[in-house]
Every structure is written in C-alpha cells, then in structure tokens.
Amino acid sequence: VVLVNLLICIIVFYTVYYVVLSVCFAVFRIKMLDGLAPFDFKTNPSWINPYYLVLVISLEITFFLCGLLFALVVEEWVWDYGVTVTIIHIIITSVVMSEFPLMLHWWLALGSGVISMICAGQILAYCLFKDNFIYPILDDF
C-alpha cells in the first residue's frame, strides 16, 4: 500500500508540475515549453527574467497543490510522502542535470515549497480525516 501510494504521489507531482508549467509558460508568453524545466536549477536568479519567474512560480504552486492532493491520496501522512517525493525529485534532478544542485536560490525555493506542501496538506488532511487520526497516548510517560 505504501509503495502504491508513493507511486501515485510521484505521478500526481509530475503531472501537476507539467500542467502548472504549461499554464505559467502561456501566461508569461514564453514561446517554447522546456521539458527539463522542473529540473532546471542552473538558471540565474533574476526577477526580470520571465523564464526564472516561471520556474519559481510553477515550483511553489506545484508544491502547494500537491500537498492538497496528497492529503486525498494518503490521508494523514502528507508530511512523510511530501518529504519522500521531494527527495526523489532531488535525486531525479541530479541525474537529469548530471550535477548535484548547489544553487542557494533553488534550495530556498524548494524548501519553502516543501513547507507549504506539508502545511497545506496536513491541515486539509486534519480537516477531512480528523476522526481517523491516530494520537499517541502520552499518559504512560
């Protein structure tokens, strides 16, 4: 069950990522959609570069939306699946770009995305499935 849920979450993550990228490319009127855009950490950070803005905005929107969608798939363990999918994304990024990402701006964007994913997903999971949540019994300590 865990591996099936993880596979579903990975598929959801990259599907949402490419849909959001497509919308952002259209909104910013960038002519060509780059298939490697989810893995691009080498673009120089510049708030006047529309390609960089598309990368950052699509990353943040993707992580937020995936947090909400992961809550529907895995119910209460959004943080666990969110962190695992992010680690897998970092590994895939390193393989695709043939280099480990060392750019601070990429890590900051990724970190804020993971935080928004976990917070949004856990809050939604709590609201939807609060009767199913398992709370530890701390009376024995």
Image (spheres, rainbow, N blue to C red):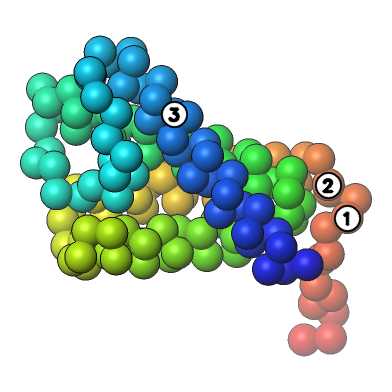
Q: Which residue is mark 3?
A: 20
Q: Residue at x 41, y 58 (%)?
A: 89
N-terminal of the pair, mark 1 or mark 3, is 3
Q: Secondary structure at mark 1?
A: loop
Foreground mark, 3 or 2, reads 3
Tell me the crowding category of disc 2: few under 14, some 14 to 19, or many 20 or more residues within 10 angstroms, Cα based. Answer: some
Which of the 4 image quadrants contains residue 81?
bottom right
| Residue 67: image location, x then y, percent | 58, 44
Q: Is residue 119 visible?
A: no
Circle 2 residue: 129
Does the CB distance between marks 2 and 1 fall below 8 Å? yes
Closer to the camera in the image, 40 or 81 = 40
The amino acid on which the numbered mark 3 sits, given as a three-letter code, is: Val
Q: Is residue 24 above or below residue 95?
A: above
The answer to whether one can see residue 63 in this image is yes
Question: From this viewpoint, which residue is outermost toward the bottom?
Answer: 141
Mark 1: amino acid: Asn
Residue depicted at x 73% and y 54%: 74
Q: Nearer the viewer, residue 100 or 107?
A: 100
Q: Which mark is residue 132?
A: 1
Determine contact: label 1, label 3, CB under 8 Å: no
Residue 76, position as x, y percentages in the image: 74, 56
